[in-house]
């Protein structure tokens, strides 16, 4: 009896580590042991793998079979190790030639069929980075795996086809009865295997995106939305029910440009962990939009789960928009936890088994009523809330959180005249998106050498150094800070917005009007 080794990938968050799947066949009584910190799904795999190998015509050795997943200190989770374990066991028995550095990532059914698994995209990315470019997956995961540049992907429908391709005796092999499966073939280059109908990728548009032309009135809101899209700024909208806050928020993603290759790969990798296995068949090019309900827990918003955590809504909104409607109704602790990802663009989740870091560089859009009954805007004649109720309601949005929101606007009620004359008459999303794209291009040219993408990422060292406007332009900011109405962080936020306004107008540096407008959009929300 002998020893053999194959390769798989263990995921902790989006970080993948290569795992050596070692198999040893001893001379003692029959047994099947899997060691190396496997979870329950892996421990339960033993009988499943024996049945899959037997039903494929090549049963595992009846002797003691020990499988070690190295490094032994790294937690192993899920069923994507199934195929690698069977291949290593059959190689140790001499039934299959050694497969070298090939990586195997698939779940096995009792009949030997290869089933898709979640997280194929980040797993293949990790394998290619480690120098393992030949990847074997299920046919349903092949299109997703082939999205990774440099990967040589082979998709198969069943274990018998994998064994035949690896050099096993074809006379011994049995294929399961076809149930919509297809023969395995190399799908490098992104082709989808014949007969597999790809499901739409997450966030694929099933209908036309909502158009900003549908919003009646709200001139300040439309301009604030354009500024937010152009510079990647966070936005707070306060107004009575029915004023159009949700309509404006839902139209922000349509103003954003398509994701570049590296950002699209990040976003698709995140959704690969959450989407149904085998559903990611193309890169997600449109910025995602996440709108969790106000009853969402901390785990739902930031990620969590037993064992190794999964990403939450904040990470699923990476490079897109996170919209919190009725923001004061969220739990205070949940919404205050947004402060850290707003600053550093990532979420860290610590568990006893492992720690995971997920990217979370999103645009935050908050919508709120001015008071619990929502009627205190304008004259507020119909408002039934006491001053204490109003302070308590809006006070759930803490000062430190609001200080991180660049644009804070009031969204008043729409009059009948505006509704009758304005709906469908304003600028369309496509027109505004052209200006947004032009402003983004100017930012990319200016910030490329710094490794930044948008003005919203500018730090204090740049805003007070190389990108500092002339003294006469920043004079209103100095006066606001002297009055105590603007914090040091707020000073930086206003300068970021001023740079975005300059980019929208095609200017090389902000002028006084840009700073005044940026201050205006930070003072429209009543205290």
Image (cartoon, rainbow, N blue to C red):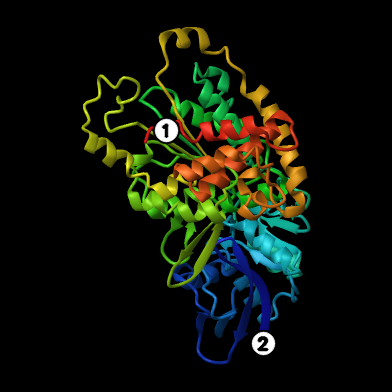
Mark 2, mark 1: which one is toward the viewer?
Answer: 1
**Residue 112 image position (x, y, % from top left):** 58, 62
Quarter containing the N terminus = bottom right
Q: Residue at x 55, y 58 (%)?
A: 358
Is 162 positioned to the left or the right of 51 in the image? right
* 275 to 409, vertically: above or below: below
**Disc 2/disc 1 C-alpha distance (Å):** 73 Å
Q: Residue at x 44, y 24 (%)?
A: 244
Is 32 positioned to the left or the right of 393 in the image? right
| Label 1 sits on residue | 525
Mark 2 closeness class: few <14, some 14–19, many ≥20 residues within 10 Å: few
Mark with earlier residue (2, 1): 2
Tell which of 473 and 354 is nearer to you: 473
| Label 2 sits on residue | 2
Q: Residue at x 45, y 42 (%)?
A: 483
Tell which of 406 and 297 is nearer to you: 406
């Amino acid at each position: 009896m002998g020893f053999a080794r194959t390769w798989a990938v263990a995921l902790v968050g989006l970080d993948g580590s290569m795992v050596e799947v070692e198999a040893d066949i001893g001379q003692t009584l029959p047994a099947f042991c899997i060691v190396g910190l496997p979870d329950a799904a892996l421990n339960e795999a033993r009988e499943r793998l024996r049945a899959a190998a037997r039903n494929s015509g090549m049963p595992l050795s009846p002797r003691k079979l020990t499988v070690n997943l190295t490094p032994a200190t790294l937690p192993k989770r899920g069923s994507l190790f199934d195929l690698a374990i069977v291949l290593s066991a059959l190689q140790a028995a001499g039934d299959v030639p050694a497969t070298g550095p090939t990586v195997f990532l698939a779940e096995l059914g009792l009949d030997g069929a290869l089933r898709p698994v979640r997280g194929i995209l980040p797993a293949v990315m990790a394998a290619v980075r480690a120098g393992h470019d030949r990847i074997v997956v299920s046919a349903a995961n092949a299109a997703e795996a082939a999205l990774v540049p440099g990967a040589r992907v082979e998709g198969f429908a069943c274990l018998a086809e994998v064994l035949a391709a690896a050099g096993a005796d074809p006379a011994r092999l049995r294929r399961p009865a076809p149930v919509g499966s297809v023969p395995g073939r190399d799908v490098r280059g992104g082709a989808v295997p014949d007969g597999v109908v790809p499901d739409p990728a997450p966030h694929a548009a099933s209908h036309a995106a909502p158009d900003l032309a549908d919003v009646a009135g709200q001139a300040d809101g439309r301009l604030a939305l354009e500024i937010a899209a152009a510079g990647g700024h966070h936005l707070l909208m306060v107004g009575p029910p029915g004023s159009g806050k949700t309509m404006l928020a839902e139209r922000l993603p349509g103003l954003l440009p398509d994701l570049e290759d590296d950002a699209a790969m990040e976003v698709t990798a995140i959704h690969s962990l959450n989407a149904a296995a085998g559903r990611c068949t193309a890169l997600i090019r449109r910025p995602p939009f996440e709108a969790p309900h106000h009853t969402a827990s901390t785990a739902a918003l930031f990620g969590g789960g037993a064992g190794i955590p999964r990403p939450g809504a904040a990470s699923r909104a990476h490079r897109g928009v996170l919209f919190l409607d009725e923001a004061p109704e969220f739990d205070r602790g949940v919404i205050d936890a947004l402060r850290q990802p707003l600053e550093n663009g990532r979420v860290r989740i610590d568990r006893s088994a492992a720690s995971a870091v997920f990217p979370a560089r999103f645009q935050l859009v908050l919508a709120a009523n001015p008071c619990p009954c929502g009627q205190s805007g304008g004259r507020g004649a119909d408002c039934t809330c006491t001053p204490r109720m109003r302070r308590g309601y809006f006070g759930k949005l803490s000062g430190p959180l609001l200080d991180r929101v660049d644009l804070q606007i009031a969204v008043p009620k729409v009059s009948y005249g505006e509704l009758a004359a304005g709906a469908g008459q304003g600028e369309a999303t496509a027109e505004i998106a052209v200006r947004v794209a032009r402003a983004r291009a100017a930012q990319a040219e200016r910030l490329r050498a710094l490794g930044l993408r948008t003005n919203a990422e500018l730090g204090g060292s740049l805003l007070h150094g190389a990108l500092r406007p002339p003294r006469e332009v920043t004079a209103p900011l100095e006066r606001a800070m002297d009055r105590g109405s603007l914090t040091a962080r707020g000073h930086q936020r206003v300068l970021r917005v001023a740079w975005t306004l300059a980019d929208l107008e095609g200017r090389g540096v902000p002028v006084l009007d840009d700073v005044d407008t940026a201050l205006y959009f930070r003072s429209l929300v009543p205290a």
